[in-house]
Amino acid sequence: AQTVTQSQPEMSVQEAETVTLSCTYDTSESDYYLFWYKQPPSRQMILVIRQEAYKQQNATENRFSVNFQKAAKSFSLKISDSQLGDAAMYFCAYRSAVHGGSQGNLIFGKGTKLSVKP
Amino acid sequence: ETGVTQSPTHLIKTRGQQVTLRCSSQSGHNTVSWYQQALGQGPQFIFQYYREEENGRGNFPPRFSGLQFPNYSSELNVNALELDDSALYLCASSLELGSGELFFGEGSRLTVL
């Protein structure tokens, strides 16, 4: 079974600085998706960034970028120029690319609580 | 375009009771899944529905059941509530089965006393 591990329960960053959140996963599959979701106090999970395992190029979305190391099964999130609105829980998630069945569901890590200091 | 909406946002039940949570999928989405998020944890997959049929289930007992309607809205039913069922229940929809991106609602916070 696939697992996702986030080893940093809490992180803190100064406004305008850069922070990196860690995520490792375990799978025997070769084709899958990886995601970072943000969950603010409003509770709604918001997709931050997505990476397809077959793509070697690291995904980037504005201030958010990932370092995807497939062989090491590592998927870290870098937030540049941190803003107060970035404060939230961040969840790393895995999804099999196999269609159908429970393999289509997201497997989440336990999350990292990010605080941004003004 | 309307996003995923869930109701109720909060509710309190007592042990042994039954609860129904509702979800309206994002327009055009035919796949809906439900997740349970206990306090301080990541969400855990309960089950998924595709075109009104259950299409995958996580490690949850049969007292967790669901429905998906022709308009792709969905219900999560939990019978014989236990204290450990207290959690945030999240609904997520996607455009197609196997589609990479899920769109989440704001969840229903269930407290079981």
Image (cartoon, coloured by chain):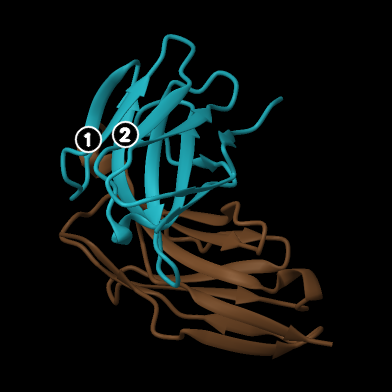
Chain colours: A brown, B cyan
Give, as a three-letter code, the residue at label 2: Gln
User: Which residue appears farthest toward the top when viewing the image?
Assistant: B70
Image coordinates for residue A115, horizontal then vertical, percent: 67, 83
Q: Can you tell which mark lies on residue B48?
A: 2
Asked if residue A26 is positioned above or below residue B104 in the image, the reply reads below
The answer to whether residue A96 is seen in the rendering is: no
* Mark 2 secondary-structure assignment: strand
Give, as a three-letter code, the residue at label 1: Gly
For the residue pair A18 and A93, the one nearer the viewer reads as A93
> Residue at (42%, 57%) from the top-left corner?
B87
Q: Can you tell which mark lies on residue B56?
A: 1
Q: Chain ID for label 2?
A: B
Mark 2 or mark 1, which is nearer the start of the sequence?
Answer: 2
Image coordinates for residue A100, horizontal then vertical, percent: 24, 31
For the residue pair A86 and A57, the one nearer the viewer reads as A86
Q: How many marks?
A: 2
Image coordinates for residue A58, horizontal then vertical, percent: 51, 64
Which image quarter is the N terminus of chain A in?
A: bottom left
Asked if residue B30 is positioned above or below residue B93 in the image, the reply reads above
For the residue pair B96 and B105, the one nearer the viewer reads as B105
Image coordinates for residue B45, horizontal then vertical, percent: 31, 49
Asked whether the residues under the numbered discs 1 and 2 touch, taking CB atoms below 8 Å apart as contact, a structural biologist would say: yes
> Residue at (46%, 84%) from the top-left corner?
A9
Q: Chain ID for label 1?
A: B
> Residue at (20%, 62%) from the top-left corner?
A27
The answer to whether residue B95 is seen in the rendering is: yes
Horizontal side of residue A67 vs A83, given as left or right: left
Query: Are labels 1 and 2 on one chain?
Result: yes
